[in-house]
């Protein structure tokens, strides 16, 4: 609801700037200014205000793990019999595990989602076996997907437009269940 409130207060120029940054956060203010038909200084000022207000949290690069010979594995976990101590143990395990790129606490069908990067299926199996040797008694359900050459869509939600065509590759996803 907070996002909707802030989006409602955001004018068309602000939404256009966000759309441009969402598509390519590396483009210079002058290029964004041309696309949104505003001056470079206005765009720079607006971006600064979007950052200060917390609407923009970070401008970051998207790294393709496959370019480094890595396979990405998304692991979806649902737990039972967990308490704060177990949650802290899981968090510490994931923080110390270099193969974990990110982890997200979830609501709904799963409690935790994480992305693991490995050079081989065997390396992923070692990671998963290690995790399960410590926490399997708290696991209620696990689902694993691997993504090969994923598509990335430019999003149109800031301007109520349809998503544009994929930026690259075609999506192939394989679902493994246990």
Image (cartoon, grey):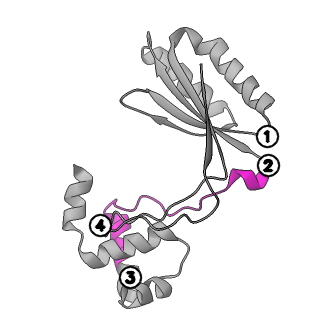
Image: 28 above or below 73:
below
Mark 2 is surrounded, within 10 Å at the Cα level, by few (under 14), some (14 to 19) or many (20 or more) other residues, namely few
Q: Residue at x 54, y 22 (%)?
A: 142
Residue 69 bears which disc, if any? 2
Q: Nearer the viewer, residue 120 or 130?
A: 120
Give the quadrant of residue 146: top right
Q: Secondary structure at mark 3?
A: helix
Q: Is residue 37 above or below residue 164?
A: below
Label whose residue precedes the other's in the sequence (4 or 3): 3
Q: Residues within 10 Å of mark 3 (few under 14, many from 20)?
A: many
Q: Are marks 1 and 2 in contact (CB under 8 Å)?
A: yes
Mark 1 or mark 3: whose residue is earlier in sequence:
3
Residue, disc 4: 160
Residue matched to label 3: 43
| Residue 63 shown in magenta | yes
Q: Nearer the viewer, mark 2 or mark 4?
A: 4
Task: Name the residue tied to disc 1.
Answer: 119
SS type, badge 1: loop
């Amino acid at each position: 609801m907070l996002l909707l409130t802030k989006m409602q207060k955001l004018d068309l120029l602000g939404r256009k700037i966000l759309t441009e940054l969402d598509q390519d956060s590396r483009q210079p203010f002058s290029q964004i200014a041309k696309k949104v038909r505003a001056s470079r200084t206005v765009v720079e000022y607006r971006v600064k205000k979007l950052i200060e207000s917390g609407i923009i949290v970070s401008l970051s690069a998207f790294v393709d793990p496959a370019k480094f010979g890595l396979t990405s594995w998304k692991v979806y976990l649902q737990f039972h019999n967990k308490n704060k101590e177990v949650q802290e143990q899981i968090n510490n395990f994931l923080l110390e595990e270099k193969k974990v790129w990110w982890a997200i606490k979830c609501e709904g069908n799963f409690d935790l989602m994480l992305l693991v990067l490995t050079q081989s299926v065997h390396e992923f199996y070692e990671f998963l076996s290690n995790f399960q040797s410590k926490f399997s008694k708290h696991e209620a359900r696990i689902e694993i997907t691997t993504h090969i050459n994923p598509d990335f869509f430019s999003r149109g939600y800031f301007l109520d437009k349809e998503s544009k065509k994929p930026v690259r590759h075609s999506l192939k996803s394989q679902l493994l269940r246990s």
